[in-house]
Amino acid sequence: MLSRLALRSEIFRAPLCTSVRCAQTKPAVVSTNESIIVPGFPKPNGQPQPNPFDGPERDLVNFPRPTRLEFPSKTRYLFVPEEWFEFFYKKTGVTGPYVFAAGITTYVLSKEIWVVDHEFPYVLATIGLFYFGWKKFSKPLATYLDKEIDDYEAECNTSRQHELESLKETIESQKKEVWRTEAQKHIFQAKRENIAIQLEAVYRENAIQVYNQVKKRLDYQLELANLKRTVQQRHMVNWIIENVLKSLTNEQEKQSFKRCMVDLQALAAANKA
């Protein structure tokens, strides 16, 4: 009990608790943890991020999560906590804590629980020694502890900052990969168009081949028909000439020859005129 009172005393706590944070609980009204929210990180729907360690049955009102105090709670008379006085104020008024302290002191002295003997001056000497130590070593010790806490906090923040930077780089690389992946749809569209062009080229090549083959066959049929007509005409002319020559006699031939000569001379005279 006395050790707790000594640790909570203003003598030891005033210079040290500024660097060493004391623990205290306070009621929690929301199930969010602001400490895990990274500055600059987008919040879902503009709301604080929920604490991932709080389950659906977590009772933060009756069993709040402990938080660290930046400064120690107030004390009176170097070591008596302020909340003790506030506890008595609600029940006994302003004089209650003093009457209680006086009654307790009277009780322990009257019942000789606290015996005042020849060793009692050692208590005063011990108090004076603690007071001298507080005056002499409190500021250097508090400065040293502040430096240690600042170094530890800087180390924690450095590792945290490095982790945040690595996460930001990962996010940027993932965004770049997403952007590259979105370009794949344009590549797929170009490939589809390229395949469609290739299919169109093959179709047109096949159509040209069919056209050429059909044209060759039609040209063959046309040449065959022309050749057949030419042969028939030549055969018909030869047949007519042969039959005409067979039907003519020598006199008819001479008369036709003479007539041809007369016609030729008439033609020549007409040309000269």
Image (tube, grey):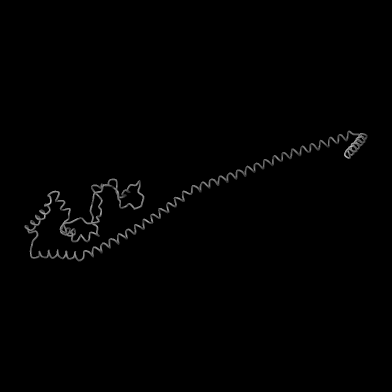
Seen as rendered, the residue at the extreme top is 247
Give residue 216's position: percent from left, percent from top.
69, 42
Quadrant in the picture for the N terminus: bottom left
The one of 107 and 264 positioned closer to us in this rendering: 264
Frontmost residue, 6 versus 69: 69
Image quadrant in which the C terminus is located: top right
Q: Within the image, what quadrant is residue 234 found in?
A: top right
Drawn side of residue 194 relative to residue 115, left or right: right
Left or right side of 230 for 102: left
Q: Residue furthest front?
A: 273
Picture coordinates of residue 245 (x, y %)? 88, 35
* Residue 150 falls in image quadrant: bottom left
* Front-most of residues 268 and 108: 268
Q: Position of residue 38 (x, y in %)?
A: 34, 53
Residue 192 falls left or right of residue 86: right
Q: Is residue 57 left or right of residue 246?
A: left
Please state the horizontal and vertical placement of residue 170, each as a whole percent of the image.
40, 54
Count up the numbered dots.
0
